[in-house]
């Protein structure tokens, strides 16, 4: 397999990296420890969409760039190096945009795609519920037929982008073991949002959403009745790959900071990089990072070819997110007491990395998926 970056990808990445440094980095400093506002989120998305981040997966006939997933992954990794919060915001918005393009009726596409492509509309997906976790079939949010539409009732939890989103793609139960997807518009339909305080990734909004007898017309169902679960499962491999690109960005930032510090920090008359145990820490960090990168790029490459990569995505996600924890923990160790100070970003890298082992299947859920592929035996039942 050839994962050498093409000249086109390199040029796109160089221009994007310069833009991040000039336009994104100065803004993100203000929300390292607090959730970005709706105004800030929209301003950031408007800046990024022309580079193919936020809606780049959409094909040209939908107004997008039709970026392949490997190229997109490189862009997200570079963004996560500076701000995994903004990368997460854009990744979730991009996934919602692709679902609208793939499943929306002509009228829904006409109403929403131009705003998405202009960076004016931000979306998110709402699947998880309290007490349900990864058992999607046990969800309790319902959509009951009412006249020419459906009434939605229920609660969603751990929903990224919810507080800043203009629309939410909601998975709801429409019949026994039948799950459908609905687009719920903040202004048109309304929904109640409560922000959640959390360990890390504090700039990236995460919230609880409540739907209290929300009436949506039939055209706001995306896809056919009962098609929501299948569409959701298709998106998990993609989501696992892009969570992994966030882990790569965080891990690389921690590794680079550690190498720089080890060369500058003097101890016992020489840089600490000259001490064998420090070099051992750096070597293991670099090995973990390189292995993570190769696994993630493999899954993204397969996805770019239109091939199923459920196994590869689960391997990449479980390894890369756990490796990011090890790398950021070692980065604190290299920095010593300075590593735990809020003045430096190491403790934030550590907290951010710890967050990523949970979404889109915990490490343990992904291990069960890997085990199922290896043995043909389903441990979920």
Image (cartoon, rainbow, N blue to C red):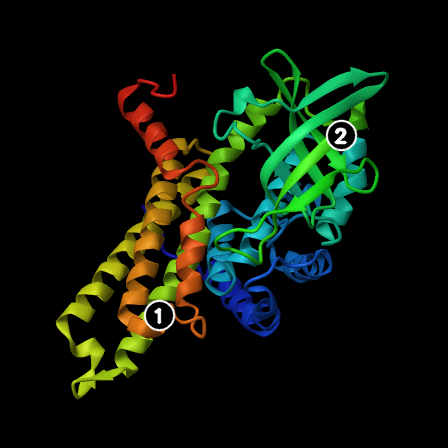
For residue 103, the mark is none
Outermost residue toward the bottom in this view: 269
Crowding at dot 1, Cα within 10 Å, few <14 / some 14-19 / many 20+, comes out as: many
Q: Quadrant of the C terminus?
A: top left
Dot 2 crowding, Cα within 10 Å, few <14, some 14–19, many 20+: some
Q: Name the element at disc 1.
A: helix
Q: In the rendering, at what x and y percent does residue 72 appear?
A: 52, 51
User: Residue most toward the right?
Assistant: 147
Q: Quadrant of the N terminus?
A: top left
Question: Can residue 2 be seen in the rendering of this structure?
Answer: no
Q: Which residue is mark 2?
A: 212
Q: Nearer the viewer, residue 196 or 8?
A: 196
Q: Residue shown at 62%/50% (left/top)?
A: 65
Towards the viewer: 348 or 165: 348
Give the x, y percent position of residue 284.
22, 59
- Residue at x 35% of width, y 19% of height: 378
Task: State the residue position of label 1.
Answer: 339
Instruction: Name which of mark 1 and mark 2 comes first in the sequence.
Output: 2
Q: Is residue 40 above or below residue 343?
A: above
Observer-nearest residue: 238 or 214?
214
State the image coordinates of residue 101 (x, y, percent, origin top left): 68, 36
Q: Is 34 in front, or is 143?
A: 34
Q: Is residue 194 above or below residue 214?
A: below
Q: Give the residue at the far left of this rendering.
A: 276
From mark 1 to mark 2, how far is it between C-alphas? 46 Å
**Rendered view: 318 above or below 104:** below
Q: Is residue 295 left or right of residue 142?
A: left
Question: Where's residue 98, x and y in %?
Answer: 63, 39
> Residue 344: which quarter of the image?
bottom left
In the drawing, does residue 264 fall left or right of residue 343? left
């Amino acid at each position: 397999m050839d994962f050498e970056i093409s000249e086109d990808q390199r040029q796109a990445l160089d221009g994007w990296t310069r833009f991040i440094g000039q336009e994104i980095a100065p803004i993100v400093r203000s929300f390292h420890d607090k959730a970005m506002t709706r105004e800030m989120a929209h301003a950031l998305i408007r800046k990024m969409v022309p580079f193919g981040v936020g809606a780049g997966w959409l094909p040209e006939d939908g107004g997008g760039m039709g970026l392949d997933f490997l190229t997109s992954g490189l862009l997200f990794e570079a963004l996560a190096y500076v701000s995994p919060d903004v990368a997460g915001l854009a990744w979730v918005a991009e996934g919602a945009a692709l679902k609208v393009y793939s499943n929306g009726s002509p009228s829904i596409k006409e109403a929403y795609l131009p705003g998405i492509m202009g960076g004016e509309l931000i979306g998110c997906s709402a699947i998880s519920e309290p007490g349900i976790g990864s058992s999607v079939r046990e969800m309790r949010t319902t959509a009951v037929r009412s006249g020419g539409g459906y009434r939605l009732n229920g609660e969603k939890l751990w929903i990224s982008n919810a507080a800043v989103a203009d629309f939410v793609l909601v998975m709801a139960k429409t019949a026994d073991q039948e799950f459908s997807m609905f687009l719920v518009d903040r202004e048109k339909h309304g929904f109640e949002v409560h922000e959640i305080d959390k360990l890390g990734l504090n700039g990236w909004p995460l919230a609880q959403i409540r739907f209290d007898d929300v009436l949506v017309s039939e055209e706001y169902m995306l896809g056919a009745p009962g098609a929501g679960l299948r569409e959701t499962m298709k998106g998990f491999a993609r989501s696992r790959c892009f969570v992994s690109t966030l882990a790569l960005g965080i891990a690389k930032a921690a590794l680079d900071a550690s190498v720089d510090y080890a060369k500058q920090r003097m101890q016992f008359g020489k840089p600490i990089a000259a001490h064998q145990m420090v070099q051992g820490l750096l070597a293991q960090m670099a090995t973990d990072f390189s292995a993570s990168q190769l696994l993630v790029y493999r899954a993204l490459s397969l996805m770019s070819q239109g091939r199923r990569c459920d196994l590869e995505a689960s391997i990449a996600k479980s390894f890369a997110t756990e490796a990011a924890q090890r790398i950021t923990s070692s980065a604190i160790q290299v920095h010593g007491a300075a590593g735990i100070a809020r003045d430096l970003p190491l403790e934030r890298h550590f907290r951010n990395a710890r967050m990523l082992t949970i979404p889109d299947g915990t490490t343990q859920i992904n291990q069960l998926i890997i085990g199922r592929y290896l043995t043909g035996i389903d441990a979920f039942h």
